[in-house]
Image: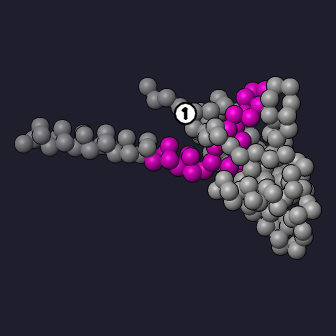
């Protein structure tokens, strides 16, 4: 039987975070150093780190650079997307894809049912899973062809 992969199984668990009060210039430096296109904005809470926003490199360009504002004095809270689309650990890969399509996003934080940060799932992660599944399917087709060819020879 086919096993559905979940967001918790697919996601990257090592994530780069920022806080609302982090200066945008520092956030941009952190993105460059970590070679990531987004930061998950979190708050420390009783159960753990809770996602309160997402800051992408595009957010910085459209909210700061394009408006000729000073990233050295602005904070992450001023440019981030608040209340982002979030995947729960147990959500299927198909559910995550549907939410990404509906919300128009390429990255989603993954959380526990209590809202505690677990990781991040990206469209690239989902492409990788799909590519592996397509390769397995192609192997099945090729195996069937070899069997038919051997039986007729």
In the displayed structure image, the side of residue 142 where residue 65 appears, left or right: right
Name the residue: 24% across, 39% down: 144
Locate residue 76, reporting x and y percent: 86, 54
Residue 76 colored in magenta in the image: no
In the displayed structure image, the side of residue 42 where residue 148 appears, left or right: left
Name the residue: 31% across, 42% down: 139
Locate residue 99, reporting x and y percent: 69, 44
Locate residue 48, reporting x and y percent: 80, 29
In the displayed structure image, the side of residue 148 where residue 111 appears, left or right: right
**Does residue 134 appear in the picture of this structure?**
yes
Residue stretch rendered in magenta on the structure = 102-131
Name the residue: 62% across, 33% down: 8
For residue 6, above or below residue 31:
above
For residue 118, above or below residue 57:
above
Locate residue 20, reporting x and y percent: 88, 48
Q: Quadrant of the N terminus?
A: top left
Q: Which residue is mark 1?
A: 5
Number of numbered discs present? 1
Task: Decide which of 32, 80 is in the foreground and name it.
Answer: 32
Q: Quadrant of the C terminus?
A: top left
Name the residue: 81% across, 67% down: 62
**Does residue 96 appear in the picture of this structure?**
no
View extreme (left): residue: 153
Task: Decide which of 132, 59 is in the foreground and name it.
Answer: 59
Local secondary structure at mark 1: loop
């Amino acid at each position: 039987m086919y096993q559905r992969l979940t967001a918790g199984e697919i996601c990257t668990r090592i994530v780069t975070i920022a806080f609302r009060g982090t200066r945008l210039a520092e956030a941009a430096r952190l993105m460059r150093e970590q070679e990531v296109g987004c930061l998950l904005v979190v708050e420390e809470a009783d159960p753990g780190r809770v996602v309160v926003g997402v800051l992408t490199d595009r957010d910085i360009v459209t909210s700061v650079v394009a408006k000729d504002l000073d990233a050295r004095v602005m904070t992450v809270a001023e440019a981030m997307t608040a209340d982002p689309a979030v995947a729960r650990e147990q959500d299927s890969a198909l559910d995550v894809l549907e939410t990404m399509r509906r919300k128009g996003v390429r990255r989603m934080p993954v959380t526990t049912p209590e809202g505690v940060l677990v990781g991040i799932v990206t469209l690239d992660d989902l492409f990788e899973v799909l590519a592996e599944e397509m390769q397995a399917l192609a192997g099945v087709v090729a195996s069937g062809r070899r069997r038919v060819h051997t039986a007729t020879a």
